[in-house]
Image (cartoon, helix red, strand yellow):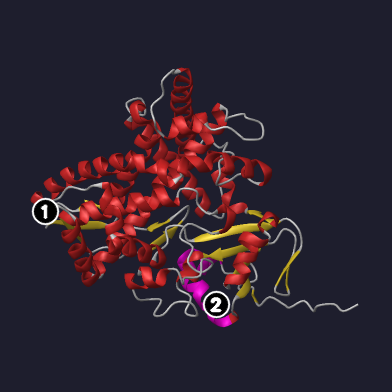
Amino acid sequence: MNHIPIKEIPFDPGHPITGHLKEFQADKFTMQMNMLKKMGSIYKFNVGRHEIIYLAEPTYIRHMLQTNYKNYVKNFFYDELKVILGKGLVTSEGEYWRKHRKMIQPAFHHKQIRQFQEIMVDSTKKLILQWEKQALEKTPVNIEYDMRDLTLEIVVKCLFSQDTNIFSKDASDAVNIVLEWSKKRMESFVKMPKWIPAKSNREFHEAFSFLQSVIKNIIQNRRKMNSRPDDLLTSLIELTDEESNVGMDDQQLFDEILTLFIAGHETTAHTMVWTWYLLSLHPQVREKLQNELDSVFTGNEFSSDMIPQLQYCKMVIQESMRYIPSVWGIGREALEDDTIDGFAISKGATVGVSIFQMHHHPDYWENPEGFDPERFHPDVVNNLNKWVYMPFGAGPRMCIGNAFAMMESQIILSIISKQFQLNLRREIPVEFESGITLRPKNEMLMDVIKR
């Protein structure tokens, strides 16, 4: 009997005690690109005593995320998210995840999400009124704060519509406290036990309990209504599992709503932050975008039939998500032994894909360090390998809200860019901080110039 020889995965253990912890925390993306250059399309390294395998070849990634995806579950990196998201789509596994994904999918169909365009437009116009005043006063905007505030307002209105008065500013503040607590724990390799009554833990528990109370109260009131508003919450309440004909209970709904706050708020906010940053650094791209907007818009008013015409606007967002992906990586744990192209993956192994690395991989992108929206021109975009370009993940667990996020990003970018030009203040260096999403480490200030 012939045995296929097992190939050895190139390994760089780093320091005997800390491994590559220092480099991973300081600048993980430079570290990853250096390891790719030195070791190739599959490699492993230590972070502390923890061994991590990275895949950097499309067929290897497809194997983990599609061909044999049932063998690869979310790894330890997602444990902190489970505290707040419970069994939502991002954190659940197996048959439970499969049933919920199938049940929830119709709520994010293209026809369903079009109804939310007006909310996105109105919320963006509200921000424009605020920025007009700051432009007159020559006061810079904190772009991360404003984008997070805008996308949170949008997701709250899309979820709760007429109940947004119940979901008060206190509830919005509670969402941010919960997210910040989770982000800090995900970024820390030494975690304080959650039961210790430290200030951060107390604030988290109070905010999380308050959120549960507010959201479950909205859910219970909505269930009693004879005539329900046409929003995401109503869609989620009325969805049923086609096998059992049973819908979600209050806790399951709460988990999915918190998941939507992460997916529909945090990720889109930082996609927009990085898009404004990149446009400020590349005025020739910004000028071409403005020319398209001037030709498509009638005055400053936006209408839904404009979206298909905003082709360069879409290309800018796609290139922004390539250059600085807000979701920067994917982590999995092998349930059983496996083999990828002759390389042995042991049961329990941590296996990762750096989306950032694949989006800058010199074998698959021409001039990967250049910011060039033309690489997403309709004539060439269909030739892109979906296992190389993965801003929303890939395979069966690809982000369910990708169409919602793209529509929202195009609306925000087009309406604001039609009226304003944003220029980065360069006094504070821009550095990456990677937790749930890839975001600026320091405050990012921008001057708002009225066009």
Q: Where does residue 438 sit, x and y in percent of width and height?
A: 42, 58
- Relative to 312, 244 lies left or right: right
> Where does the N terminus fall, quadrant-wise?
bottom right
Q: Disc 1 residue type? A: Lys
Q: Nearer the viewer's eye, disc 1 or disc 2?
A: 2
Q: Is residue 326 visible?
A: yes
Magenta stretch in the rendered image: 21-38
Q: Is residue 143 visible?
A: no
Q: CA distance from mark 1 to mark 2?
A: 45 Å
Q: Main secondary structure of the magenta part?
A: helix
**Vertical order, 273 against 37 (above or below):** above
Residue 138, numbered label: 1
Q: Residues within 10 Å of mark 1 (few under 14, many from 20)?
A: few
**Vertical order, 221 against 275 (above or below):** above
Residue 394, numbered label: none
Q: Which residue is mark 2?
A: 36
Q: Where does residue 287 sit, x and y in percent of width and height?
A: 19, 67
Q: Where does residue 44 sit, x and y in percent of width and height?
A: 63, 71
Q: Disc 2 residue type? A: Leu
- Relative to 115, 224 lies left or right: right
Q: Quadrant of residue 233?
A: top left
Do residues under tags 1 and 2 come within 8 Å of each other at their CB atoms?
no
Q: Earlier in the sequence, mark 1 or mark 2?
A: 2
